[in-house]
Amino acid sequence: MKAPKFAPTAVAVALLFAAAPLIGSVGATVVTGKNAGSAAPAAVAAKARAPAAAGQVHKITLKTGMAGGKMVYLDEKGNANPVLKGKVGDTLEITISSGEGAEHDIVFPELKVASAKFSGKSVVKVTVPLTQGGKFTYYCSIPGHRQIGMEGTVEVEGPAGSAAVTVPAGAVKTVALGAGPAGAIDAKAIAPAAANAVSISMDPNAVPKPIGKRPPQLVKYHIETVELEGKLDDGTTFTYWTFGKKVPGPMLRVKQGDTVELTLSNAPNSKAIHSIDLHSVTGGHGGGEHTQVAPGESKTIRFKVLNPGLYVYHCATASVPHHISAGMYGMILVEPPEGLPKVDKEFYVMQGDHYTSHAHGTKGHQAFDHGRAADELPTCYTFNGSVGALTKEHKMTAKVGETVRVYFGVGGPNKVSSFHVIGEIFDRVYSEGSVKAIKTDVQTTLVAPGGATIVDFKVNYPGKFLLVDHALSRVGKGAAGALEVTGPADDSIYKASSGAMHVEH
């Protein structure tokens, strides 16, 4: 069987072994381009329990790729996650590269060996001394990769003790793979803010126009996934993963009964595989099953929108919480045949929870913290991707007497939002994004992660109306927006007293 071919791609984010001890000595050399065969393999010394053994050297070539819908290691014959075999005293000399371009590594924790990370055209050589008999595991330590298939077995014949292995002077490299308890914050100094950081915040005014009455038709969309350095807060940057360079991704608008042809492309300079799962889709894991796209590649799906409503879409590539928290979410509105009631202003707002290596407000470049995400302990919350996006960067405006509609969703990945507008009452709430489940006169509405709602209200009084998550501690961590309403004040609706109020008993 021939090994499948893969186009260059991608990246994932590096994972330190959670709660693992320091993993000993590693002989690993990264080689790129034409020099891929020039680096000498290194070996690892272990304390001798058995006599020195002059064993065989097994040369193995592996390449990462996709097989059977899973991410795997492939040998030269195309076997997925092959069993690696040898005897105590032997050495595995592995040459490994990324077949689809994404970032990977290969680790042998029980044998105390780990490779450097590799992606794109880089090639890694790693030496694995077989120091004891038994069955051992190898896998990729990038978040989520082991869970979606990158795991295999090493079978070593011989006693369960250790064999001595001779190591060339200077060939050993020590790599620390442990980082304390899950959720612990790295105490080292934060990196400087990225100099090339850009705004990633989606303009809340970027709502497609209402469709109106028309028969179902074919609608085509093309979205590119892009990884970039973005502004998280004043003086703080973050590596965002995005749909279309913005958070949230573009709002899509179609009609019930339409057929949608969606092409997802992954930018050539990405380091991770990305995908899209639309909650409006029936089948194919919402599209996520067939849109796992490596860097530099594209995939297309077609689906019919059967149900009207407002739906979330997001990336469905492991680690899914990382991809979502890094900005990979958006919404698709499926209008009913008759459309929605006409309003004067429409806005597009999504809330996200973020898990960073340092506390909210720390200046510099924040890294994603997998431990905090696993423990559901956000360091900040955002409306439209960054702190201040809807209070400093973008304006939402209306005039007294106009009717406002907010399409509101929660990308998450973890936290429920208690959506509220201070100083207003929702005249109509399309509960959970359903265009049929309508409630009236609502103060605060719950929106689940991966959920959405539509709220309509007429603005009867001027001023600045704050959009918040009414779990109000989150406002101080970034979950705030502002709607500025201009026009004449009606004293019969609201009037502030100029003096002290006398209260009779």
Image: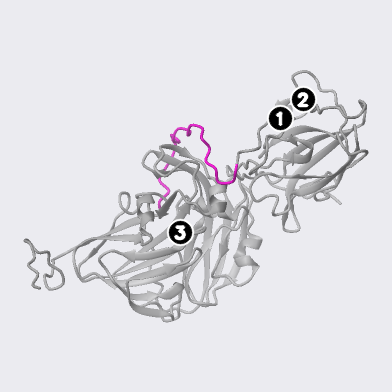
What SS does tag 1 mark? strand
State the extent of the magenta-drawn residues as a range. 181-201
What SS does tag 3 mark? loop
Does residue 189 show up magenta in the picture?
A: yes
Q: Residues within 10 Å of mark 3 (few under 14, many from 20)?
A: many
Task: Say above or below: 301 vs 327.
Answer: below
Q: Which one is earlier in the sequence, the residue at label 2 or at label 1?
A: 1
Residue that numbered label 3 is attached to: 250
Q: Position of residue 296 (x, y in %)?
A: 61, 47
Q: Nearer the viewer, residue 300 or 95?
A: 95
Q: Quadrant of residue 260?
A: bottom right
Q: Give residue 192's mark.
A: none
The main secondary structure of the magenta stretch is: loop
| 423 left or right of 301 in image | left
Q: Residues within 10 Å of mark 2 (few under 14, many from 20)?
A: few
Cα–Cα gap, marks 2 and 3? 47 Å
Is the Cβ of the residue at disc 2 closer than 8 Å to that at disc 1?
A: yes
Does residue 421 show up magenta in the picture?
A: no
The amino acid pointed to by label 1 is Val
- Whether residue 499 is visible here, answered yes or no, is yes
Task: Say above or below: 388 vs 406.
Answer: above
Q: Quadrant of residue 474?
A: bottom left
| 88 left or right of 228 in image | right
Q: Name which residue lies at 48% across and 33% down.
A: 191
What SS does tag 2 mark? loop
- Whether residue 323 is visible here, answered yes or no, is no
The amino acid pointed to by label 3 is Pro
Q: Position of residue 503 (x, y in %)?
A: 9, 69
Q: Position of residue 137 (x, y in %)?
A: 79, 45
